[in-house]
Image: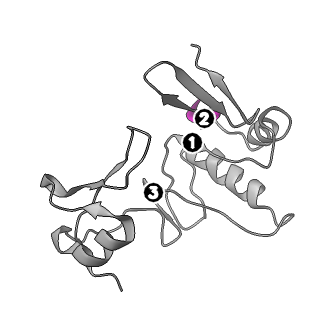
Amino acid sequence: MLNYAGDFKRAFNLDLSGSNGVAENKTQSKSKNVGKVKLTPFSEIEPEDVTWLWDQRIALGKLTIVAGEPGLGRTFAILDMAARLSKGEPFTNEESGESGEIIFIGYEDRTGDTLRPRLDAAGADVSRIAYLDGVMVKTKSKCLRYSTTSEKWRTWSR
């Protein structure tokens, strides 16, 4: 178990004397962009109840990861749930349906030949489902975009 002040400081070479819990990495580096982290001791965090999208299975507003061996139907199940959520349909006969927007992050199946046709077949409201296709990184001189579909960095263009 880590001792908050001592072990974190040693493990990450942090200066914990900053205000508001912001700790700066004091490692000497040629880069001027040395990272900062904000550490909050759990003694300052109030416990909260979990709000469930699907009772005891999927928490609302949190990242849900579905993992398993190939061929078990992970994508099928997730796309079915996304379709139901996009239309406000329940996941089971025992629950009422919630509606909402979905961000799909997946790298095994292609969007146009697999994911979109499966969403259409499930009757999804595809206007409420988005695919994370890239991440933008800003530097002082330019903006770069990493595309998850092409797996390449490119200069950002809108």
In primary-sequence order, the first of circles 2 and 1 is 1
Q: Which quarter of the image is occupied by the C terminus?
A: top right
Q: Earlier in the sequence, mark 1 or mark 3?
A: 3
Residue drawn at (65%, 45%) of the image = 83
Q: Amino acid at mark 1?
A: Ile
Residue at the spot 48% in from the left edge and 69% down from the top edge: 55
Residue type at tag 2? Ala
Q: Residue 103: which numbered mark, if any?
A: 1
Q: Secondary structure at mark 1?
A: strand
Give residue 135's position: percent from left, percent from top.
Answer: 56, 34
The residue that label 2 is drawn on is 130
Report the residue marked by disc 3: 62
- Say whether marks 1 and 3 touch (CB < 8 Å): no
In magenta, the rendered stretch is 127-134
- Give left or right: position of 117 versus 63: right
For the point 51% across and 19% down, the residue is 142
**Disc 3 residue type?**
Lys
Residue at the limit of the structure toward the bottom, as seen here: 1
Number of on-image labels: 3
State the CA–CA distance, disc 2 to disc 1.
5 Å
On screen, residue 117 versus residue 129, left or right, reads: right
Contact between marks 2 and 1 (CB within 8 A): the answer is yes
Q: CA distance from mark 3 to mark 2?
A: 16 Å
